[in-house]
Image: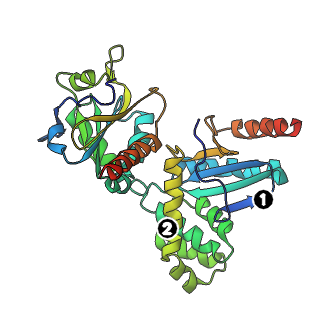
Amino acid sequence: MNQLIIPVNSFDHIFGNTTAALELVEYGDYECPYCGRAYPIVKNIQQQLGRELKFVFRNFPLRKIHPNSFMASAAAEAAGLQDKFWEMHDIIFENQKTLEAENIFLFANKLGLDIERFKNDMQLEPLIKKVESDFESGLRSGVNRTPTFFINGKKYEGDWNGGQLLQDLKSMMADTLII
Amino acid sequence: MLTTGTIAPDFNLYSTPDQKVKLSELRNKKVILAFYPADWSPVCDDQMTLYNEMGKYFGKHDAQLVGISVDSKWSYLAFTEHNKFHFPLLSDFEPKGEVARLYGAFNDKTGECLRALYVIDENGIIRWSYLSPVGINPGADGILNALEELDNVKSINQ
């Protein structure tokens, strides 16, 4: 059973209740159509589970097959420096067929970001390193496609499509409550 | 599957319609052999797409990846172009599966390769292997661990 090699930490983007017992980590590629399909499924899970869930997104850009994926990851990270990581994450997935640079800047504009700073931040070495180290931690944790999910540190081998992931999270929640 | 410590059997297979790759010519490098069932099949796509991203990581360990299946060199040409692969795929096509059989990585029932991984060191000795269930993409963590361990052993011995 594959485990998350690097546990969720302060460098991660965490959505929801940071003290929730239930933790869902996604390794995703912004240009990957399967991740695009998973996006509303995860949104729904977040709505259903509310404060019971902590959700983390880590970058896993497959840049040879998805040429815009790395830039999209950098864009979300750069937006994060202006406290708009999740807003950028969402707008990218909602428009994932048009991720060319000019569109990324349109998104940034729409989100009210300081564009000059955003452009500059996207090139910052620590930010690029963050994306690369996400990718590497994914490789070492056994990520073998996108999206790959981890629930409380364990790789999720079930089918995330449809309602299965929510069901499995709910039953894990029930288990933790009993303990 | 061949065991760790044995000499990797040599082979000479087509990587493109007019180019062959010989294992013994890759000496001085570590070689990762990834046997896989078939071009275009869903799990193989994922697996090779992942490995395609890993040139940098394999390069750090001075390792070269090659994929091997029983598909023809013409299928490879299309498969490689479609997925923009940056590493060679070798065609174990005629006699079919001959190399895969040498490595214990052939499935007689389906006539395809098994999903098997080997790491071979600079001297052509097998140092690590893994047989994955056909339907499961083994990812890259096992390969990376094996390469790291080989480099660690080397630096201790030096």
Which quarter of the picture shows residue A154?
Answer: top right
Q: Which amino acid type corresponds to the residue marked 2 in the rendered image?
A: Lys
Q: Residue under circle 2?
A: A129
Q: Which residue is mark 1?
A: A18
Marks 1/2 in contact by CB < 8 Å: the verdict is: no
Name the side, left or right, on which B93 lies relative to B140: left
Q: Disc 1: which chain?
A: A
Q: Is residue A19 above or below residue A178?
A: below
Number of marks: 2
* Residue at 36% from the left image edge and 28% from the top image edge: B37
- Judging depth in this view, the residue of A176 and B5 nearest the camera is B5
The residue shown at (78%, 51%) is: A53
Q: Earlier in the sequence, mark 1 or mark 2?
A: 1
Against A176, residue A100 (above or below) is: below
**Quadrant where the N terminus of chain B lies?**
top left
- Name the outermost residue toward the left: B18
Instruction: Give the residue at the far right of this rendering.
Output: A178
> What residue is at 78 percent from the left and 59 percent from the top?
A18
> Residue A79 versus residue B103: which sits nearer the camera?
B103
Q: Which mark is residue A167?
A: none
Q: Is residue A33 above or below residue A169?
A: below
Q: Where residue A23 sits: x, y (%)? A: 73, 49
Q: Residue under mark 2: which chain is it in?
A: A
Callout 2 secondary element: helix
